[in-house]
């Protein structure tokens, strides 16, 4: 099912776009709202730091494990219906988290919140169905960009709400936003018919993908605390890879697989997903290194408060919104492959410049703006490339797989850049050297995305396909 030139009226699809983009923004915000409080949760909940760390990890795990599954459910039962249900689950998880007094209950609530990330690939698939062909690139870019924009808004919003009304209020805000999203989508977004009528849900493939991806993400996220040579890291990581290989072999033979592995291994899909992995590594590297640099003392950093540093990072959100019309025009003119390469190159410049010249605050803010613009271009192009390379009835599942792979990049970037900055003191390096290496490694990941983008086959990614 593809976008229709004579589909819904302008007023209808504009309202639909607004509802879906709002849902994606809420899902993106949810990831980072708790980060300003991460160091305070052990005291607030009277729990060990190792236990409260799962407040972030459980959310990321559920988001990663469920993304391709939720996308497939959308293909089977209707993408709008599944998106609305997932936002209801998000709201329920928010209420559980807000009412919790124990860390275990809060972790369970955060895990339920995590499934909302799947609304982003579902929304992109819905927009491809309901929007006029010449508007699809704009809508998809907006929805895709909300993952990063929401994450940038979530930190200062969480800090501000907590300061005014306490940490539980942060989750009550999430619950209200979730219910607003449910009502808005239910009223504004047209019902989409199942894209795969009569197909059966691949339960074994779903279980294998959930177990394998969760174990791999745990290995990546815990690699810093476990140590690179630990048996736990290699044991969990190795077991995860074995489960994922076995799951892929099963899906190759299944009559109605969760993911069509042959399609997923098409060169355009594989290279686009690889570029997305590298870009999310770079994005998380920036999100780890730049806020730390902003709050460090003026001898090394800029001496800002954590709240002020969060507002600086919000510049990326404004830049992403500003980039949206550019994405649509460039995609139609040059194709999303070129837009992906240009956006990735902008990220290289934005991360490389402060490494080569650690200038005044205004210079770093300018780099943050370029960073947001580059990520908007790149992540706006990624779903266009994926959707151009897969059959229409598999679009939501393919976008869900891409979202899962992006989550792996996020976890890998957080672990490696965090390890670099943590090792600075133990290795006797200066702080400047640690930040230099963090920026250069992140810029190197973005440069890898440039190279991969240029290797994506031209077939199927023309401007018309976008």
Image (cartoon, helix red, strand yellow):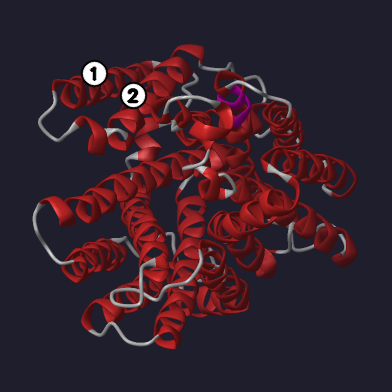
Q: Quadrant of residue 339?
A: bottom left
Q: Residue at x 45, y 39 (%)?
A: 401
Q: What range of the chain is rendered magenta? A: 106-110
How would you rate the neighbour count of disc 1 (Cα within 10 Å): few for under 14, some for 14-19, many for 20 or more? some
In the picture, which quadrant includes the C terminus?
A: bottom right
- Residue labelled with disc 2: 215
Query: Who's the residue at 42% across and 83% down the image?
Result: 361
Seen from this angle, which residue lies furthest top? 204
Q: Is residue 261 visible?
A: yes
Q: Which mark is residue 257?
A: none
For the residues labelled 2 and 1, the Cα–Cα distance comes to 8 Å
**In the image, 140: left or right of 77?**
left
Rendered position, 351 above or below 392: below
Indicate the quadrant where residue 70 lies: top right
Q: What is the number of callouts on the image?
A: 2
User: In the visual, does 306 lie left or right of 195?
Assistant: left
324, 89: nearer the viewer = 89
Residue 196 appears anywhere in the view: no
- Corner quadrant of residue 77: top right
Magenta-span inclusion, residue 241:
no
Lower position in the chain sequence, tag 2 or tag 1: 2
Q: Secondary structure at mark 1?
A: helix
Residue located at (35% from left, 77% from top): 298
Q: Which of the numbered marks, if any, corresponds to residue 239? A: 1
The overriding secondary structure of the stretch rendered in magenta is: helix
Looking at the image, which is closer to me, 150 or 207?
150
Instruction: Residue 179 in the image: state x and y as whole percent.
Output: 82, 39
Q: Are marks 2 and 1 in contact (CB under 8 Å)?
A: yes
Q: Where residue 197 sits in the image (x, y, percent)?
A: 67, 25
């Amino acid at each position: 099912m593809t976008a229709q030139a004579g589909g819904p009226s302008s007023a209808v699809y504009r309202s639909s776009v607004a509802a879906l983009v709002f849902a994606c923004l809420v899902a993106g915000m949810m990831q980072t709202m708790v980060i300003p409080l991460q160091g305070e949760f052990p005291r607030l909940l009277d729990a060990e730091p190792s236990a409260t760390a799962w407040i972030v990890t459980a959310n990321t795990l559920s988001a990663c494990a469920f993304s391709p599954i939720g996308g497939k459910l959308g293909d089977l039962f209707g993408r709008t219906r599944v998106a609305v249900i997932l936002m209801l689950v998000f709201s329920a998880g928010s209420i559980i988290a807000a009412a919790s007094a124990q860390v275990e209950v809060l972790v369970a609530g955060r895990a339920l919140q995590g499934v909302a990330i799947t609304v982003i690939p579902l929304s992109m698939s819905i927009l491809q169905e309901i929007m006029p062909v010449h508007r699809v690139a704009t809508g998809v870019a907006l929805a895709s960009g909300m993952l990063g924009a929401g994450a940038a808004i979530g930190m200062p919003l969480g800090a501000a709400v907590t300061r005014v009304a306490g940490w539980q209020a942060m989750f009550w805000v999430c619950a209200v936003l979730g219910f607003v999203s449910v009502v808005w989508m239910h009223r504004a977004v047209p019902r989409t018919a199942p894209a795969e009528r009569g197909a059966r849900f691949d339960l074994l493939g779903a279980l294998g993908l959930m177990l394998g991806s969760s174990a791999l993400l745990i290995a990546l996220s815990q690699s810093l605390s476990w140590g690179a040579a630990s048996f736990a890291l290699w044991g969990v990581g190795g077991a995860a890879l074995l489960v994922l290989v076995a799951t892929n072999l099963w899906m190759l033979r299944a009559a109605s697989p969760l993911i069509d592995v042959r399609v997923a291994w098409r060169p355009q899909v594989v290279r686009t997903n690889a570029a997305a992995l590298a870009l999310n590594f770079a994005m998380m590297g920036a999100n780890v290194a730049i806020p730390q640099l902003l709050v460090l003392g003026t001898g090394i950093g800029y001496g800002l408060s954590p709240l002020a540093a969060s507002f600086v990072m919000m510049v990326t959100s404004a830049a992403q919104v500003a980039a949206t019309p550019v994405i649509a025009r460039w995609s139609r003119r040059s194709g999303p492959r070129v837009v992906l390469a240009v956006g990735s190159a902008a990220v290289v410049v934005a991360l490389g410049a402060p490494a080569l010249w650690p200038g005044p605050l205004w210079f770093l803010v300018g780099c943050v703006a370029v960073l947001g613009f580059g990520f908007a271009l790149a992540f706006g192009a990624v779903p266009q490339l994926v959707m151009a390379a897969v059959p229409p009835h598999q679009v939501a599942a393919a976008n869900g797989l891409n979202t899962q792979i992006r989550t792996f990049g996020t976890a890998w970037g957080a672990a490696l850049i965090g390890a670099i900055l943590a090792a600075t003191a133990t290795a006797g390096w200066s702080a400047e050297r640690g930040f230099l290496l963090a920026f250069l490694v992140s810029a190197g990941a973005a440069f890898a995305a440039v190279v991969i983008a240029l290797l994506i086959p031209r077939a199927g990614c023309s401007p018309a396909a976008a």
